[in-house]
Amino acid sequence: MQKVLIPIVTFALGVGVAMWAARPQPAEQPAPAARSAFAAIPDAIGSQDLTGPYEVVKGWPKDISTLPGNEKWTYGAGEGVFAESPNRVFMLFRGELPKMDPPKATLLPQLGPSISFPVAGLWRDATVASLPGVGGTDQDTRKWLTAWEGKDDQIGIKGPPYRVLGVDAKWENCLVIADEQGNIIESWTQWDKLMRRPHSVYISPYDPEKHVWVVDDNMQTIYKFTNDGKQLVQTIGTPEQEGADATHFNRPTFMDWLPDGTFFVSDGYTGTRVAKFDKDGKFVKDWGIKGNPPNEDRPGYMNNVHGVAVDPVSRQVFVNDRNNHRIQVFDEEGTFIKAWRIDADPSSLHLLYIGEDRNVWTFDRSTHKLLKYDQDGHLLYAWGTLGSFPGALWGVHGMHVDQEGNLYVAEVDNGRVQKFRPKPGANPDYLMAKPVKAVWQ
């Protein structure tokens, strides 16, 4: 009986398997499309987020060589930018450099075997090429010209040959204004001689008269101009005299305001403090102690105070403690609240920006990325690629956003200002927030 059942069962199984294999097969279904959780354009195909949620506006602004009689010159180091509106954008430069095409690839055997130049398309560092010749921490600003010429080794460049003023660089068109199409509509050349190393430019969002402020770290001053540039109405600090008191700065860098007009100054490259002033520019107080870089972790100790931004709601003051690779946060009276360290090694933050969403944006010159943090230091987004082509970033030293959401960046190393417009469909969380609503908008 058992011998009979085995063939029958085997036969039945074979028929069943054959019928199962011969059944109609469902059509192959494609894998569900994954929606990116981090891409600036969630549905974009093949994107790298090279320019984050933006597209670069090529050809903006027009080159300074388009000005009559200036055909042989281009922009020097781009220090700052401020958009009063899309049709009036202030751009701050350290003079001008010779306009020329990039050099062809060249071997440099005098430096060593297999060395060539340019590297990765980078060929002229505008912040090294531009006047003046001093910029870093503890450098002697009185030697600005001889350092640039190469007659001392303060900046690591020593001749001969020596650079020549008027040939290798010139000091003109430091503050220019462009319209929405990139046309240069104003140049405040009447104030070029007043400046030596203009560092940042602003209009307070709480000033109905829209005065224009320029921080000059080599002159140890902050200048306040009428909006049309015709008058200098105030100078804070003592020109060409360093210090750390009510009337002196030590290489001031940036500033920001509270809604009542109170403002704070990061002071500075050599100084180690934040200075507070009332709405009329009268000194109120300061705080900060010289630290021990690069790993200082004591609250309130600072080195190279290179950025300040104010949260207008909490009135907290965010400070870029650059040489200690951290951001410190204080209340408006200078009481320490918290700090967070930037974990890139090394990092070199250039500035801070807080817009209407109250998040903190910065740029790291070491990684060449724009970084968005919440107020506790959590990274929310980052983008940026080193290069000199349109949309790449090299040394972002100033940034601002206009009322339409366009982003502007000034680059010291590339020697330019770029304009970026939001891409259609961009994740709004990845856009740099518009500035605090101004009383004059």
Image: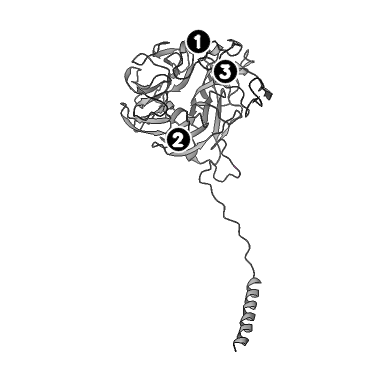
Residue linked to disc 3:
129
Please give left or right for residue 281 compared with residue 93 in the image: left
Disc marking residue 193: 1
Q: Quadrant of residue 184?
A: top right
Identified at 55% across, 30% down, the residue is 393
**First in sequence: mark 2 vs mark 1:** 1
Q: Residue furthest front?
A: 113
Q: Which mark is residue 224?
A: none
Tell me the colour scheme of the image. one colour
Q: In this picture, which residue range is highlighted in magenta?
A: 45-50
Residue beneath disc 2: 343
* Camera-nearest residue between 269 and 27: 269
Question: Residue 412: image x %, image y %?
Answer: 53, 23
Residue at 61 percent across and 83 percent down: it is 6
Q: Residue 137, how many percent across, how many down?
A: 45, 19
- The answer to whether residue 129 is left or right of residue 338 is right
User: How far apart are the alpha carbons under marks 2 and 3?
Assistant: 30 Å
Q: SS class of the residue under badge 2?
A: loop
Point out residue 103 in the picture as x, y percentages from the top left corner. 67, 22
Spatial CA distance of label 3 from label 1 is 19 Å
Instruction: Give the percent coordinates (x, y) of residue 145.
Output: 52, 10
